[in-house]
Image: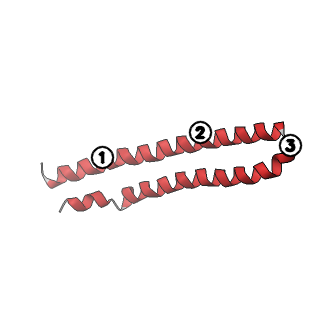
């Protein structure tokens, strides 16, 4: 194969990888946020006096869940716009 075919193959596989990274990351973040919010609501309903303590922890964990997804999007953008795999082809 010549360099143009290698370039096209790397870009195609990178596009598939980017789609998987963003898609699965978004699905995982949505599932995690749903589980976290339902657990918070259940705990607040059982013990309303613990609500301020639980609320702080929930907001911290929701931020960490969202941050992991944003880091995945950043890595996907790295591969989309500055693909280090293309340096192999000279």
Asked if labels 3 and 1 touch by Cβ distance under 8 angstroms, the answer is no
Q: Earlier in the sequence, mark 1 or mark 2?
A: 1
- The answer to whether 52 appears left or right of 23 in the picture is right
* Label 3 – label 2 distance at C-alpha: 25 Å
Q: Residue at x 79, y 52 (%)?
A: 53
> Residue 86 placed where, x, y %?
26, 59
Q: Residue at x 54, y 53 (%)?
A: 68
The quadrant of the picture occupied by the C terminus is bottom left
Placement of 33 over or under 68, stated as above or below? above
The secondary structure type at the circle numbered 2 is helix
Q: Which residue is mark 2?
A: 31
> Residue 81 placed where, x, y %?
37, 60
- The answer to whether 20 appears left or right of 63 in the picture is left
Placement of 81 over or under 32, stated as above or below? below
Q: Which residue is mark 3?
A: 48
> Residue 17 placed where, x, y %?
37, 46
- The answer to whether 13 appears left or right of 39 in the picture is left
Asked if labels 2 and 1 touch by Cβ distance under 8 angstroms, the answer is no
Q: Residue at x 28, y 57 (%)?
A: 85
The secondary structure type at the circle numbered 1 is helix
> Residue 39 placed where, x, y %?
71, 39
Which of labels 1 and 2 is toward the front? 2
Q: Which residue is mark 1?
A: 12
Q: Earlier in the sequence, mark 1 or mark 3?
A: 1
Q: What numbered label is drawn on residue 74?
A: none
- Seen from the viewer's position, the closer of residues 38 and 11 is 38
Which of labels 1 and 3 is toward the front? 3
Q: Residue at x 21, y 59 (%)?
A: 88
């Amino acid at each position: 194969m010549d360099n143009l075919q290698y370039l096209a193959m790397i870009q195609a596989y990178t596009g598939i990888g980017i789609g998987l990274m963003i898609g699965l990351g978004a699905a995982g973040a949505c599932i995690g946020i749903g589980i976290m919010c339902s657990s918070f609501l259940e705990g607040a309903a059982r013990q309303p006096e613990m609500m301020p303590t639980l609320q702080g922890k929930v907001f911290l964990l929701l931020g960490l869940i969202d941050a992991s997804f944003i880091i995945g999007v950043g890595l996907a953008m790295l591969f989309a716009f500055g693909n280090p795999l293309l340096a192999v082809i000279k």
